[in-house]
Image (cartoon, rainbow, N blue to C red):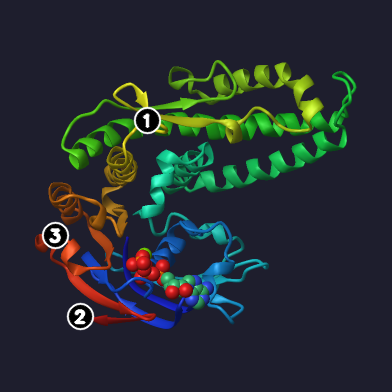
Amino acid sequence: MLLARLSLADFRNYQSLEIELQPGITTFVGANGQGKTNLIEAVNYVATLGSHRVASDTPLVRAGSTQAIVRAELKRDLQSTLVEIEINPGRANRVRINRSPVPRPREVLGLLRAVIFAPEDLSLVKGDPSERRRFLDDLLVSRNPRFAAVRADYDRVLRQRNSLLKSVQGSRPGNTPTTLSVWDDHLLDLGAELISGRLNLISSLKPYVVAAYETVAGVGSDVDMNYVAAASGISATNSERADVRVALAQALSEKQREELARGLTLVGPHRDEMFLGLRGLPVRGYASHGESWSCALALRLGAFDLLRSEGLEDEPMLILDDVFAELDTRRRDRLAQVAAAARQVLVTAAVAADVPAGMGGVTLKVNEGQVDVL
Ligand SMILES: Nc1ncnc2c1ncn2[C@@H]1O[C@H](COP(=O)(O)OP(=O)(O)OP(=O)(O)O)[C@@H](O)[C@H]1O
Ligand SMILES: [Mg+2]
């Protein structure tokens, strides 16, 4: 799927914008604070219904406005799809596909598949486990949009179960309300599905990340990725949903006393972690700045290659925000080769000289929320 046209109304610092985009590489150049990242954030919103920078939608709406609108025209062969998203912080967003309202915004997921690499991604390897869980779950949804519902349902069940546990906090095991066992079942079903999905994803993703690290860093470095579950008995070799459910159920019953004491759900995908290692040592807390950066980039490029390998008809878009400035010349050239092979790539840079000369494509100038051909 190609993004052929993007229009924004009151999104970040864009009052009104309409641009056409081509296949291949488009580079957005402009001084700091002009709106380069805002622009690719809008594109990524169409792909994921979320921002890669902020957790809430409020900052996405231009100061002084109540609503932002992002419109994207997607093209695949001769077929074109118009996606329109009304971002209404504090109220439900509204989505139209080909001018027809859809009952749930998440129906838009999967139409445009994109992998974005941005400076914030350093927290993918340096930040807390929630960053890596989000990475995995976003990629699960890109690979298979059905997981959007699993994830949303799991979050809802977790909230309900936690508030029930809070309300009976301090009670003794064996003396719990029957509604708790209903929530236990939902938690186990959805939790097992999510964990099993993540385990299979890591198995598929790992070889691509290892190869991407080599591409970026120029050396093979024994990159390791492993799922670490809060419940014991869950591992890559035991990734079937039914097996995961059994292990989760066992852990849940072992933790019942502690859960009742703390009023909190202590097992499930929300407590899990993805371990990243380099030459036998954890990346987090051990790797150098350059190694951490290469590792984060390798995760994104690996994700991109995985998606690409699975949908040749439907190549994902690659978005590289401000990445070249951080890399030395050799790494820049290697990344440029990766970009040259992709179907559609959006690149941002504050200085045109940071982008390798041979990249080619179209360069657009971003200035105070306006975009012009350079
Ligand atoms: N909701 C908003 N309303 C109005 N302006 C906003 C809003 N959110 C962000 N901005 C403005 O957008 C600008 C930042 O844009 P952006 O992050 O896209 O910059 P950039 O071109 O990527 O710069 P850099 O090269 O520093 O990364 C800031 O000046 C900020 O004040
Ligand atoms: Mg930026």
Q: How crowded is mark 3: few (under 14 residues within 10 Å), some or many (20 or more)?
A: some
Q: Nearer the viewer, residue 277 or 257?
A: 277
Q: Which amino acid lies under the numbered mark 3 shown in the image of this protein?
A: Pro
Q: In which quarter of the image is residue 190?
A: top right
- Above or below residue 317? Residue 172 is above
Residue highlighted by disc 3: 356
Q: Position of 269 compared to 372: left or right?
A: right
Residue 214 seen in the figure: yes
Q: Residues within 10 Å of mark 2 (few under 14, many from 20)?
A: few
Q: Where is residue 249 in the image (x, y as percent from the top left)?
A: 67, 21
Q: Is mark 1 on a helix, strand or loop?
A: loop
For marks 2 and 1, the one nearer the N-term is 1
- Above or below residue 259? Residue 5 is below
For marks 3 and 2, the one nearer the N-term is 3
Residue highlighted by disc 1: 286
Residue highlighted by disc 2: 374
Residue 74 seen in the figure: no
Q: Which amino acid lies under the numbered mark 2 shown in the image of this protein?
A: Leu
Ligand 1: quadrant of the figure: bottom left
Q: Nearer the viewer, residue 2 or 367?
A: 367
Q: Nearer the viewer, residue 235 or 326?
A: 326
Q: Position of 85 compared to 78: left or right?
A: right
- Above or below residue 267? Residue 149 is below
Q: What element carries label 3?
A: loop
For marks 3 and 1, the one nearer the N-term is 1
Name the residue rendered at 29%, 53% in the picture. Answer: 315
Q: In which quarter of the image is residue 257?
A: top right
